Image (spheres, rainbow, N blue to C red):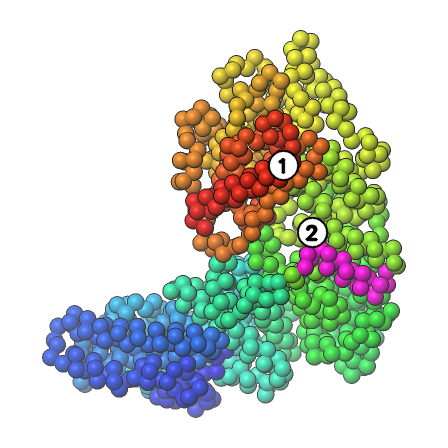
Amino acid sequence: MTPLQDALAVPASDRNPRLPAISSDPGELILPGSEIFDASAVAARLDADLAGLSDAADIRAATVAVLNEVQDRSRAAIAAAFAQKPLAARRVLRAYALLADGMVRETLRVATTYLHPCPNPTEAERLALMAVGGSGRAEMAPYSDLDLLFVLPWKMTGWAESVIESCLYILWDLRLKVGHASRSIPDCVRLARQDFTIRTSLLEMRYVAGDAGLAEDLTRTLHDKVFAGTVSEFIEAKLEERAERHEKQGGQRYVVEPNVKEGKGGLRDLQALYWIAKYEHDVQRARELVDLGVFSLDEYRAFNAAERFLWAVRCHLHLITGRAQNQLTFDLQVEVAERIGYVDHGGRRAVEHFMQDYFRHATRVGELTRIFLTAMEAAHLKKEPMLIGLLRGARARRRKLKPNFTVIQGRLAIVDDAEFLSDKLNLLRLFEEALRTRYLIHPDAMRLVVANLHLIDDEMRRDKVATRIFMDLLLKHGNPERALRRMNELGVLAAFLPEFAPVVAMMQFNMYHSYTVDEHTIQVISHLAQIERGEVEEELPVASAILKAGVNRKVIYLACLIHDLGKGRPEDHSVLGARIARLMCPRLGLKPEDTETVAWLVRHHLLMSDMAQKRDISDPRTVRDFAKAVKTIARLDLLTVLTVCDIRGVGPKVWNNWKATLLRQLYHTTREALETGLEDLNRDKRKTEAKKALRARLKGWDRKALTAETGRHYAPYWQGLHTDAHVIFAEMLRDITEHEIRIETGLDEDRDATRVSFALADHPGIFSRMAGALSLVGANVVDARTFTTKDGYATAVFWVQDHEGHPYEERRLPRLRTMMEKTLKGEVVTSTAMDQRDKIKKRERRFNVPTTITFDNDGSEIYTIIEVDTRDRPGLLYDLTKTLADNNIYIASAVVATFGEQVIDSFYVKDMFGLKLHNKLKQEALDKKLRAAIARVAERAGA
């Protein structure tokens, strides 16, 4: 909380609202007070301009003109000064509050002196003007609401109504967003008793102008009739409100686009602590919590630093957007980082360093919240947590606590701090005991741990008992994520594993990852434990079966823990991570061969995902190359589990049936190859098996038609599609004429996508036209295959999803088919229609994905694989395939992998003679043309 000055810096009983609310002392404001609002000069200017005016409209217009000029000049001066001192948030807040106070006072003076003079007021014609809420705290960001309370002694009089109305009209004309209420003192008492939001705003009210005696009466009455004796109910209400607010904002501290004001670990959490402290102890400054023993000096400093940082961020958000913006969206993160002075370094962007600091402050706010609530619990102000009450019966049957541990208010606590600290290994044993007994850890115990992190030294890190305790936390109790998350929040994890420290609160600036690196790591381990507990057998049959059959648990858990610890450095994080694994694993008790397995898994933890999502896994060469890299079934099993957990730990909407199907297919074909030998992976065998399966499905066909169908396709067709697709194309091609276009759509449940199949006469560029037709209806292509029959027809199948990543609803399919037919018939010109496509949203424009284009002649036996890694934009697939078609490149298949704003399109291609693209000059020319196409797409999308 910003320390409130003068009027609020004395006990409530002695408070005198006549004192100025905001200090103009040097150092308290970002500019001298006279440069922000020179009250005497403004009053003199107004008196001069209003002299001789009698019409109310003229008086109001003249007042607004003067105050607008003052406001614009002062706001510009404050913003300029803030740009020079971008973290001086408190001085900026007080400056805006001082400006608002001056404008409100002059507005009221004009209303009561020029518009509605009342030379002989009655007792009922008294009026006090109070600032409440953020205005009352003198915490005003550039575009914060101006919250005012017009206080009356009793009911509203005609004079008071006129004055209030005129004040509001002037303030509105000044473009201020005013929150206001007009209430008598009895109204304030009644409403404060009924509504905790109103009560909180009145708790922070501050006298601004008008009848000071009336303001004193209100302050005294509220204290005596509302605040006194109601501390417990107020605290409970604030905690409930806090929980609801967190749930509404997503419930997590590491939301990638956090709300600085309302989010978990944000300003509202700090304010809630201050409200409770003020209500209970009548503190006026956060530092007083140190004297009361609620915070240590170090904890107060952390409180102070977090508040200063968060307010600075919020003020910059307001100034950048020109409005009360509190959501730190991706595009604004970049601008705020630049304003505060962050720069790129260490292989990471400035915005990533900025957001890491943001999340560290948010985590500290969470710790401080727990510490404060402990003090409230000790005073019996907060009820036992609901979760504790629900589980009381179960906990009563739990194991007996180990020595020097006890339970206080349903949480695991420490009996004797000195005894606990006499053995530094107890800093780890605390978390083990919490897991063993299933108790939550008491915040006092957490506080003791945080204050003594220095005890975790190299000697302790090498201690065999310490490493045994840590490995037991991972392996023994079935829910390691709970211990790891609390250890991470308290700094224990980074202290015991220094290699973990750099990734704490590390944000990855992209739209793919929903969590910071440390939270992602804990999520990955959480998913592994969930699979091990047998909770997702139906959803993840392969991974569940692997773990049920048995793997080296130390290896898989440490691979999950270490796999991303190399992030944030210029070097490839997988290569660096493998080196980290070779350092960490021996220290944690692993044998040399197990250490090498962990290092291999970390080095190749993206291999299976890349193969499944970026390559055609129906191509025997893909499976053969993957099997050669993996070498053994044991490694295949471990890598499969790690890959599944890694993808599921990226974010709640990343894992889907499509990825599951690809990984299962790759796993089964690779396992079969490793068991029976790589020589079994050949096209002839697959072609024979596929034809046999099709004949079994087409039992109603006569022999002649069946022979024609099985003989009209080349080998890649039989290996590249499932039997279901072969059946569909057989029906579509039956009796087709040269000028027909046949389209079939349907749900592919296994792939969680809509399948769109085409059969039509083949001609150059057909793949591009089909991709363009799908782009025009907003379909997101996730995979595609195209084949040519021996008798000159194209058979193509695209798997598409809507913009939310789901299959198309049945009711939308007719429009999909109609648009595709029009495009393929030439009734719609794709390149022209593309110009009307949606632009990239502003919040997404700051993402930079460098374009990389590679030509791979080794990944497939008969095709060149062109891999285009770039920024995803509407219509990109169409422009790329059109460029290839224009250069006489035949596309056999396209594999599309999307990772947030990044897309990797892999095209399996041949030249016009049916050969691979070996010529370097041709590759370079095609590279330039593809980059030019990407640039055109970017321009069209408004990037």
In this orientation, does residue 916 appear? Answer: yes
Inspect the image, locate mark 1, and give the three-letter code of the amino acid beneath it: Asn
Inspect the image, locate mark 2, and give the three-letter code of the amino acid beneath it: Asp
Where residue 742 appears, as percent x and y from the top left, is 52, 21
Residue appearing at x 40%, y 77% in the figure: 81
Q: What SS does tag 1 mark?
A: loop
Q: Which residues are magenta?
A: 571-590
Between residue 358 and residue 266, name the one nearer to us. Answer: 358
Where residue 688 appears, as percent x and y from the top left, is 75, 21
- Look at mark 1 in the image and give the residue it sits on: 919
Where residue 123 appears, as percent x and y from the top left, is 25, 84
Which image quarter: residue 270?
A: bottom right
State left or right for residue 739 relative to residue 293.
Answer: left
Q: Check disc 1: other Cα within 10 Å, few if <14, some if 14-19, many if 20+.
A: few
Q: Main secondary structure of the magenta part?
A: helix
- Look at mark 2 in the image and give the residue it sits on: 646
Residue appearing at x 66%, y 57% in the figure: 520
